[in-house]
Image (spheres, rainbow, N blue to C red):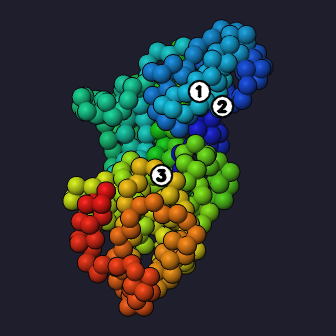
Amino acid sequence: MKLYEYQAKQLFEQYGVPTVESDVVRNPEEAAEVARRIGGRVAVKAQLLVGGRGKAGGIRLVDSPEAAADAARELFSMRIKSTPVKRVLIAKAVDILKEFYMSFTIDRTRKMTVLIISAEGGVDIEELAAHSLEKIQMLEIDPNTGLAEKELEGFLGQVFTEKNRSEQAQDVVSRMYKLFIEKDCSLVEINPFALTSDFTLLALDAKIIIDDNALFRHPEMEAMRNDEEYSADEIEAKQYGLSFVGLEGTIGCIVNGAGLAMATMDLIKLFGGAPANFLDVGGSSSPDKVVHAFDILTRNTKIRAVLINIFGGITRCDDVARGILWAKEKIELRFPLVIRLIGTNEKEGRKMLQEAGIAAHEDLVSAVKEVVKYA
């Protein structure tokens, strides 16, 4: 779950990570009021979950409340990477002596949390990693032991060479790590982490991603969920207990189990096709869930064929077959279906389909080859 900058800064404030005075607004009049309250020069920043807003003109520096209102008005009329700007952050502007980059994330290869720092902030870290990897420092953190103070001190000293600066950075890092662990984050990032003219280190931007799978432990975070991150189909699918992610291909997929769904998409790519979606109906799919899955897929005009791949464990193949037959009765299916049923009650499910004149494969590879041919 991605957070807007203003939401991430709220968490920073809760954990004592130093940042600048700011407030989010939803119209130009509010922008003027907040700029007047903050006083002096302010940054007017579009709030989006997509990157690249700075390069797209989504950040303005202004010197008066009137200019803040004008800048906000312009931003509210913009679309950045096809996303409309609905919120704007007004933040106190500061004089910057130097910019750094700092983040905690998960390195799945190492199976550890890593602290990443660089003496070059304010740039795309991916770009820096691609062309100047030597400018990035990484510290592995064993999840069983956490941050080691002495090791952290030596690590930060490579970038923050002055003792006072290093001590400030160490305090910020400790607070970021506490936030990262307690809120089950997959990313906590400050870019830029700025040294200001009064020699204070401040988080001038904030990016946080929270692991969706841990949200049951953080009911207070549900209120921070943003519809911008999800398509209308993804939001609807969640209501019906379906896991759905839209893609760009032409082959619709209805599968039970996330691992099988990923393997199915891999096979479609292997044989020259392109999946139109990831859709997992779950381990105990009812016929209704299958109907809802079809209802979502029929809205995608790019789909030319649909593959239904069911490996029944808890899921019963006859339930899925019943859902397929219901869907054909209730919904106009304009694409051919290729079905693979195997597992619990497969004979019953296959018989139900055969009586309706629908064939079902047992072999997955032959099913994938057929659906690719149709598409």
Q: Which residue sits at x=51%, y=47%? A: 209
| Disc 2, SS | loop
Q: Which residue sits at x=41%, y=31%? A: 101
- Identify which amino acid the numbered label 1 is placed on: Ala
Asked whether the beta carbons under mark 2 and mark 1 sit within 8 Å of each other, the answer is yes
Give the residue number, with chain letter if any, for mark 2: 87
The answer to which image quadrant residue 182 occupies is bottom right
Is the C terminus in the top left, top right, bottom left or bottom right quadrant?
Answer: bottom left
Answer above or below: position of 302 versus 98: below
Give the residue number, with chain letter if any, for mark 3: 300
- Identify which amino acid the numbered label 2 is placed on: Arg
| Dot 2 or dot 1, earlier in sequence | 1
Q: Nearer the viewer, residue 192 or 325?
A: 325
Q: From where the camera sits, is residue 259 visible?
A: no
Q: Residue furthest front?
A: 357
| Dot 1 or dot 3, earlier in sequence | 1
Q: From where the camera sits, is residue 295 visible?
A: yes
The answer to which image quadrant residue 36 occupies is top right
The answer to which image quadrant residue 112 occupies is bottom left
Task: Indicate which disc residue 257 carries.
Answer: none
Q: Nearer the viewer, residue 245 or 6?
A: 245
Task: Indicate which disc residue 46 carries.
Answer: 1
